[in-house]
Image (cartoon, rainbow, N blue to C red):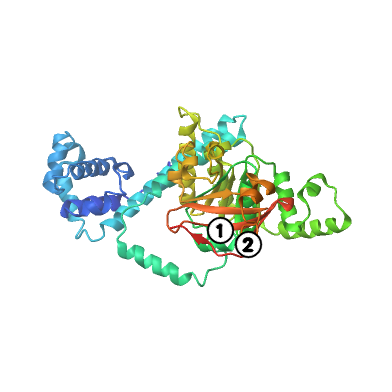
Amino acid sequence: MAQEKLPPHDIEAEEAVIGSLLIDPEAILKVATFLKPEDFFDEINKTIYQACFSLYQRSNEVVNQITVAHELMRQNKLEEIGGAAYLSHLISIVPTSLHVEYYAQIVSNMAMMRRLISVAGQIAAIGYEAGPDVEASLNKAEDILFQVRMREGSRDFVPIRDVLSQYFEEAGQAAVVGEGEIPHILTGFTGLDELLGGLQKSDLIVLAARPSFGKTSMALNIARNAAMNQKACVALFSLEMSRESVAQRLLAGESGVDFRRVRLGRFSESDEVKIMEASGVLSETAIYIDDSPQLRTVDIRSKARRLRFERNIDLIIIDYLQLIEGEGRKENRVQELSYITRSLKTLARELNVPVLAVSQLSRAVEWRASHVPQLADLRESGTIEQDADVVLFIYREDEYYTAEQWNKEHDIEKEPYPRGIADILVAKHRNGPLGQIKLRFLSRIVRFDNVETEPILTS
């Protein structure tokens, strides 16, 4: 009969860790943040480390051979582990505590391998269940594995000198970016990129406006510009529009052919040439579209991580935030939206990419004398304002005033009617200035273009 194979473990490393703790009261401080009692394979070593850990958690207790023996005696476990003689044995096999972190990392790594084996069993069980919803089963399996990774990926204190060293190293490399590496995503709108410095990794950017102001068009323009100009890989979650509609909008913007003609398929021979050329150009970009109408944040995270496994994602765009389904655990929609925005911010940090979430604005904008959006207009939608690193508003005066109304109230020579002019307001910028820029919205081809003006700083 074949001998059963034991899970990965290293008893010598476990003993070296405990021996180091017994001879050096400071050693526990180096390992307690990442090494847990359940990481030990041997039950005796686990029991002793648990005693050390209990003493460490009581801030006035010192960890040494005497205190650990006393703690084990108090728990009626001293004889169980081999008595004081075994503690002396552990001390004798470790001449110094200098390498305690190295030994502890071995123990932690072996524990991670054992968890992977356990997770494999759980995933196998999901497979054997043979549930009717394959996507739900895949999400469940990925969530189980994600929990293992999250435990491994917990962060600890880092000295400022290390952070500064990393900053200057990355800054020095910024001018020589390796193949496939994009330091930040450029929107393609000159003034906005100047204000923001591009869309930064791990940031949650919210692009908000009232209906029909062009927020979807702007999000698609950013996707196109990043994919075309920087060869960025863009994951686009279109909860409102079908993939066909997204493709038609991109074609209209790229070809310059009227969107209505593209949508209806009624165009001239010359238009067809332009559309075919635009199709060829767009086909070479790395824009991936998911038009599932019902998505939860766990689905978005799962699909984004899966695409990242296959491709190195540079930007995630979600259109739009209020259409994301809640998890069904919250009391009301405001709480659900708060959970959603926090989850999107977590996703941005986990994958280290900017997440651009399109959002609706509340009707409060319509009721004010001034229709310029304010951060308060987001507050009815959970914690969007607090969770976002950057908040962008689209404001268009030609949506509120006709040319006749405008001409009655303005000197048209100094202030001509702003037909097609959109103000992009940077209402929140966690790491930079506030301000606004002007873009031209070409509604015929659903595209925003630069206007040759400098951004106006407001802070």
**Of 90 and 192, the residue lying toward us:** 192
Residue linked to disc 1: 437
Q: Amino acid at mark 2?
A: Val
Which comes before the other along the chain, label 2 or label 1? 1
Please give left or right for residue 319 compared with residue 142 in the image. Answer: right
**Of 40 and 405, the residue lying toward us:** 405
Task: Tell which residue pokes out farthest to the right in this image.
Answer: 269
Please give left or right for residue 170 compared with residue 408 in the image. Answer: left
Res. 341 visible in picture: yes
SS at mark 1 in the image: strand
Please give left or right for residue 212 compared with residue 17 in the image. Answer: right
Q: Position of residue 201 (x, y in %)?
A: 49, 56
**Which residue is drawn at the image coordinates 30% and 55% (left, top)?**
103
* Alpha carbon distance from label 2 to label 1: 8 Å
**Of 307 and 256, the residue lying toward us:** 256
**What label sits on residue 451 in the rendered view?**
2
**Which residue is drawn at the image coordinates 29% and 61% (left, top)?**
159
Q: Is residue 167 above or below residue 112?
A: below
Dot 2 and dot 1 residues touching (CB under 8 Å): yes
Q: Amino acid at mark 1?
A: Ile
| Image quadrant containing the C terminus | bottom left
Q: Position of residue 141 (x, y in %)?
A: 52, 38
Q: Quadrant of residue 118?
A: top left
**Which residue is drawn at the image coordinates 84% and 55% (left, top)?**
272
Q: How many marks?
A: 2
Q: Position of residue 283 (x, y in %)?
A: 72, 57
SS at mark 2 in the image: loop
Please give left or right for residue 292 compared with residue 458 in the image. Answer: right
Q: Position of residue 194 (x, y in %)?
A: 52, 64
Residue count near mark 2 (Cα–Cα under 10 Å), binned few <14, some 14–19, many ≥20: some
